[in-house]
Image: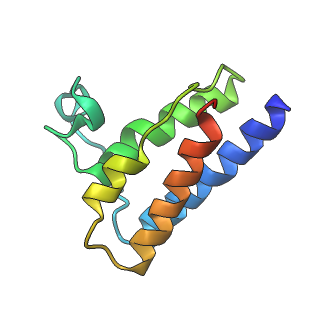
Amino acid sequence: MASDKYQQAAELLFEVEVQLRQLNYWQDAALSIEALSSELPFSHDTLTFPQWLQFIFLPRMHELIACAAPLPAACAIAPYAEEYFKRGNANEQTLLAHLIEIDTLLTDL
């Protein structure tokens, strides 16, 4: 069962990356150490939400999956994403839907 959860998570992470690229939120240039060192939720003082997804969330989740480390038992990205994308277009809504799926998958009810 756990391997199914890892597989589902990996597929959803891939879909998030696809959406970030399609929305032109994906950045090729690396960010500064300072920007990545924020300790605030979603690094909202130094990163945009799409940057946080690309440079913090996706790499950490990929690392957990690659190492078969325990996945978070709770995840609540969607509420922040809903606020960030509240005036979004249809593609942003697709990204939001994938983030809701990640929250649902990772949160033990």
* 56 sits to left or right of 71: left
Q: Residue at x 13, y 37 (%)?
A: 45
Q: Where is residue 70 in the image (x, y as percent from the top left)?
A: 65, 20
The N terminus: image quadrant? top right
Position of 2 relative to 44 (above/below) = above
Q: How is the image coloured?
A: rainbow
The C terminus: image quadrant? top right
Q: Which residue is drawn at 72% across and 47% down?
A: 8
Position of 37 relative to 99 (above/below) = above
* 2 sits to left or right of 13: right
Asked where in the image residue 41 lies, by quadrant, the reply is top left
View extreme (top): residue: 69
Q: Which residue is drawn at 62% across and 53% down?
A: 12
Residue 97 visible: yes
Judging depth in this view, the residue of 101 and 69 nearest the camera is 101
Position of 90 relative to 51 (above/below) = below
* 96 sits to left or right of 34: right
* 10 sits to left or right of 36: right
Q: Where is residue 39 in the image (x, y as percent from the top left)?
A: 23, 23
Judging depth in this view, the residue of 83 and 21 nearest the camera is 83
Judging depth in this view, the residue of 62 and 92 nearest the camera is 92
View extreme (right): residue: 1
Q: Where is residue 15 in the image (x, y as percent from the top left)?
A: 59, 60
Asked where in the image residue 25 lies, by quadrant, the reply is bottom left
Total number of numbered labels?
0
View extreme (bottom): residue: 90
Residue 29 visible: no
